[in-house]
Image (cartoon, rainbow, N blue to C red):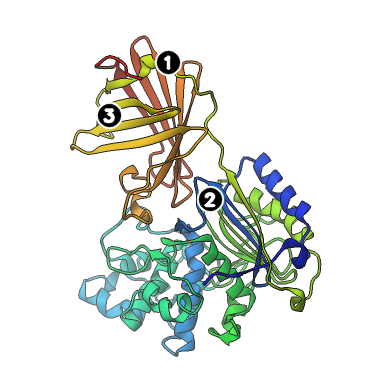
Amino acid sequence: MNLKRTSLEIANIKKEGVESFLAAVSRRGIELHDFMLLRGSYVCYEAEWTPYRKEDLHMLYSLSKAFTAIGIGFAVQEGLLKTEDYVYPFFQEELEQKGYANTIGEKAKKIKIEHLLTMSTGQTEEPPILNYEFEGNWAAQFLQIEPVYEPGTAFFYDTTATYILSAILTKLTGEKLVDYLKPRFFEPLGIDSYVWDTSPQGNSLGGIGLNVTIETIAKLGVFLLQEGKWQDRQLLDSSWIKRMTSRLVRSAGGDVYDDGDNWGYGYGYQIWQCIPEGTYRGDGAYGQLVIVAPNENVVIATLAGTEDMGGLMDEMWEHLLPACLPVENECLKEAASEKKTFSVSFPEGNNWIPASIFGTYELAENEEGIQKIQIQNTAEDELSITCFYQDTRVCCLKYGYENWMDNRISGVSYAPYYTCGDICTAQTAGSWAWEKDHLNLKLCYLNGPLGVTAKFVFSNQTLSVTACKHRSMALKTSFEFFGSAPSHPATA
């Protein structure tokens, strides 16, 4: 069940404003993957950038937190817990049985559900569990960090706090957060395509790990804009949505968030306040955004791969919101929306490539365990790069010139959070170009913001490869490989 569509004209949104926004974003080098602009509950402009597709599941990173806050809202509505409940008692029996009870300080025992929701636990460090697949007791790791400040008095952004909310909900219901939300949120909104990664303990990750489509992000925005109502049904109490989207704690100041910054205008229940008064958002790393502007009756949804999230939002404030002229809800009606298809940038260079580079190269020993790389010209303007690993794995990826070659794996719909950097388990699309003495490759990970670029330099019968992961939280993002001349005659 998709959202209704209407035209920019009916929505009274100036097309020039949308186009100037997209042009400004392009000038900044910001890579959008999907974009939707809504007036009320109507989509009036939508765009996708190949090789990304609007029906693909896309990793949300911290935009997942908004869905967790909605789940906790339903639990409060059903009387399962209160925001004033202390966190420690939910885990006390488990921690005592495993010998952790004496490691939890008195201030940590004062942390409440409210403090988890507003990122005001009083702690000043985050346990390194979400990025490293720590298999111990995550709740113990979190509660063992004694708050520096009195809980409720200081803001500190901590994804683990949101995970603890998910774990608490599972303790209360016996269901993962994602399953709990299914009949309460996903099904009523007609959302049937989503995956939420789980912790080693079997809980939805909560603060990260949700994979959905751009349409689902837009529906989330409409649900918030309508204060928990969907098609005349009040699914979640409006008072909860108002607290979610209000400025409950001060987020400016300190070492991380400064006044004037897009992250310095306050925080509610897993939702940020924005620079334009009354506007708020859920956001995830590298440009996964839902912006809700009640004053303009507007929702903006983006999936992207950028480290300039502030610049992306600044262009929205400058171009998009001013383009949304007043309109009465009663004037909105169904019509064809504006739909566009663009492409993310291709590697620089041309399509001439010397036949002498084709063949199989023996690599020097490397940390990645790649023994050989084979370069083949499989069709006109089409290359394949095959890596042969020491552990017998073989990975073959295709690249097109000014064209994205799909490397989708049958039966795999998304990339798990912990393996998002693994070519063998992620959907990708590749493109190539030749420049002077080297081959430029670009690989897009289709279920998230991650991208990889590689430069293959051929000189004096040798090969050197420099590869970089972009928009990645991996500990290592740069790689170098060195190889000898082709082991057999070149083929074209």
Q: Is residue 13 left or right of residue 151?
A: right
Q: Relative to 490, does residue 89 appear above or below in the rendering?
A: below
Asked whether the residues under the numbered discs 2 and 1 touch, taking CB atoms below 8 Å apart as contact, a structural biologist would say no
Residue at the spot of label 3: 366
Q: Position of residue 327 (x, y in %)?
A: 79, 71
Q: Is residue 86 left or right of residue 314?
A: left
Q: Please, what is the three-letter code of the amino acid marked with disc 1?
A: Pro
Asked whether the residues under the numbered discs 1 and 3 touch, taking CB atoms below 8 Å apart as contact, a structural biologist would say no
Point out the tag, 1 or 3, that comes first from the N-terminus.
1
- In which quadrant of the rendered view does residue 88 lie? bottom left
Point out the tag, 2 or 1, that comes first from the N-terminus.
2
Residue at the spot of label 1: 354
Q: CA distance from mark 1 to mark 3?
A: 27 Å
Identity of the residue furthest to the right in this view: 326
Q: Position of residue 415 (x, y in %)?
A: 37, 53
- In which quadrant of the rendered view does residue 199 lie? bottom left
Neighbor class of circle 2 (other Cα within 10 Å; few <14, some 14-19, many 20+) is: many
Residue visible at 34% across and 25% down in the picture: 375
Residue visible at 57% across and 86% down in the picture: 234
Q: Position of residue 455 (x, y in %)?
A: 44, 26
Q: Please, what is the three-letter code of the amino acid marked with disc 3?
A: Asn
Residue at the spot of label 2: 286
Determine whether the residue tagged by mark 2 lies in a helix, strand or loop: loop
